[in-house]
Image (tube, grey):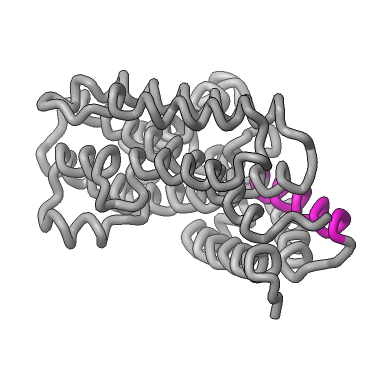
């Protein structure tokens, strides 16, 4: 039986919102680390602005708040109900999506999502001294996300519903990782002369932390210093890093192929992602440097969005053109 497109869409988006909550928590963690470092005022706002940029909701923020302020950004990303991508809204929306398809998930998955939602108000409180509370809030969000994800992996039937859940996670992750590398490269470098300098290496290590890959990077490359080329290799091309672009692409490719087999029909999205996967496997850090990191990431983001559009047309709207 084909899964109803509505059900597929609910499963996909619940997983996608859960991954987004996780990404925002990691971004805020970087902001928090930055705020602990003595820095010029300009440095601060520059970093917090880049956090907004990466989250992709800078325009919405500026419409409401006009100025870049650390506390307002934290509030906007965590609690603001007018921001559809705030952590609070992500968890709320994920729960609504799962609630509509409760019969398509195990009781454990529903309970994990539902209890996260019910603990929201207790753990996501907008207190006066938000910066002090931030580490605890971030830990709580990451813990909930890991709980939900672990429950999906350990209890769901590995059927088409499972494919939609996993696809939600990796479409979100691919997009987010690409954006975070791109923003880092452009905004955080005060000037191009710094590439390879101390500032640069410090910035890169912060970025690795923002996708919780700092320690993993150290393992992968022995204690070697963080360099631009190694970062590109690790975050884009390293199959052992679960946050790398190639890892997400491999996962999307795998699950779109499973859906094609399951429904016995090919799809444009599956052909296109297969091509992306083949191409990224043939890349090296130096090839990406030749193309230009920004150019590479820009076209990566466009391609992954194209794959998503085709995927959405086929599986959610039932009309692939």
Q: Quadrant of residue 279?
A: bottom right
- Residue at image location 66% in from the left, 43% down from the top: 166
Quarter of the figure with the C terminus: bottom right
| Residue 305 seen by the camera | yes
Residue span colored magenta: 247-263
Residue 253 belongs to magenta span: yes
Residue in the image at 70% along x and 51% along y: 252
Of residues 159 and 284, the one drawn nearer to the viewer in this rendering:
159
Position above or below: 200 against 222: below
**Magenta stretch, overall SS:** helix
Residue plotted at (38% across, 52% down): 183
Could you tell me which residue is drawn at 49 percent across and 39 percent down? 18
Residue 200 visible to an observer of this rendering: no
Residue 121's spot in the image, x, y percent? 29, 28
Q: Is residue 288 left or right of residue 56?
A: right
* 104 lies left or right of 230: right
Which quadrant of the view contains residue 92? top left
Estimate the x, y position of residue 280 in percent, counting from the top left: 70, 54
Q: Is residue 267 above or below residue 279?
A: below
- As displayed, is residue 112 above or below residue 40? above
């Amino acid at each position: 039986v084909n899964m109803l497109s509505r059900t597929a869409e609910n499963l996909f988006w619940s997983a996608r919102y859960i991954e987004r909550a996780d990404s925002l928590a990691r971004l805020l963690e970087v902001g928090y680390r930055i705020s602990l470092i003595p820095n010029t005022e300009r440095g601060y706002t520059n970093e917090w602005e880049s956090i907004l940029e990466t989250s992709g909701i800078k325009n919405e923020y500026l419409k409401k708040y006009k100025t870049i302020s650390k506390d307002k950004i934290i509030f906007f990303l965590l609690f603001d109900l007018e921001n559809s991508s705030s952590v609070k809204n992500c968890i709320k929306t994920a729960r609504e999506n799962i609630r509509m398809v409760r019969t398509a998930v195990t009781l454990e998955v529903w309970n994990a999502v539902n209890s996260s939602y019910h603990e929201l108000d207790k753990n996501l409180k907008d207190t006066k001294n938000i910066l002090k509370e931030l580490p605890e809030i971030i830990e709580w969000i990451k813990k909930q996300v890991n709980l939900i994800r672990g429950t999906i992996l350990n209890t769901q039937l590995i059927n088409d519903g499972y494919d939609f859940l996993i696809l939600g996670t990796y479409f979100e992750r691919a997009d987010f990782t690409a954006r975070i590398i791109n923003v880092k490269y452009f905004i955080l470098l005060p000037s191009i002369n710094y590439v390879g300098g101390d500032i640069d290496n410090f910035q890169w290590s912060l970025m690795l932390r923002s996708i919780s890959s700092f320690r993993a990077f150290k393992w992968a490359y022995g204690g070697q210093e963080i360099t631009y080329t190694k970062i590109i290799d690790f975050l884009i091309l390293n199959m052992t890093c679960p946050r790398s672009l190639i890892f997400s692409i491999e996962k999307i490719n795998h699950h779109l192929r499973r859906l094609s087999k399951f429904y016995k029909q090919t799809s444009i999205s599956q052909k296109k992602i297969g091509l992306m996967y083949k191409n990224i496997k043939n890349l090296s850090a130096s090839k990406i440097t030749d193309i230009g990191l920004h150019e590479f990431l820009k076209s990566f983001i466009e391609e992954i969005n194209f794959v998503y559009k085709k995927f959405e047309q086929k599986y959610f709207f039932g009309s692939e053109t």
